[in-house]
Image: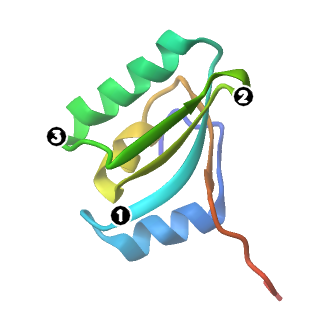
Amino acid sequence: MGGVTQVDPRLARQLTAAGEGGPVHAVLVVADGDDVAAGLVAAASAGSGLTAGSVRHLPRANALVVTAPAAWLRAALEDPRLLVASATTTDVFPW
């Protein structure tokens, strides 16, 4: 998980549980700019050979909400333009 500044531990657990092809939901915060978000999606698709099932771009938040195969998300995590990767779920009682 190379270029990512911060990866949510819940997302890391979901990626492990999903294997290669299982769908994973995530929120990705990217460096500023619409071109950066589009470039990250294209690079993750090229790097994994897969496409995301769903991508929603939130330009004012510099964020992407994605549902994608775990292999696609792992490719996205290697991109230095990605600042934060978070799961979309919460641990209700983590203790």
Which callout, 2 or 1, points at the residue further toward the start of the chain? 1
Residue at image coords 30%, 70%: 19
The residue tagged 3 is 49
> Would you identify the image quadrant in which residue 22 lies?
bottom left
Give percent across and percent down for residue 74. Answer: 38, 48
- Point out residue 23 in the picture as x, y percentages from the top left corner: 35, 63
Q: Position of residue 32 (x, y in %)?
A: 65, 15
Whichever of labels 2 and 3 marks the residue nearer the N terminus, that label is 3
Q: In this rendering, would 19 be left or right of 58?
A: left
> Image quadrant of residue 65?
top right
Residue receiving disc 1: 23
Q: Position of residue 25 (x, y in %)?
A: 49, 58
First reached walking from the N terminus: tag 1 or tag 3: 1
On the picture, is 25 further left or further right than 58?
left
Instruction: Please name which of the two marks, 2 or 3, marks the residue nearer to the observer.
Output: 2
Circle 3 residues within 10 Å: few <14, some 14–19, many ≥20 = few
Front residue (pair 2, 41): 41
Dot 2 alpha-carbon crowd within 10 angstroms: few under 14, some 14 to 19, many 20 or more:
few
CA separation in Å, label 2 and label 3: 27 Å
- Mark 2, residue position: 61
Q: CA distance from mark 1 to mark 3?
A: 15 Å
Q: Mark 1 belongs to which amino acid?
A: Pro
Say what secondary structure mark 3 lies in.
loop
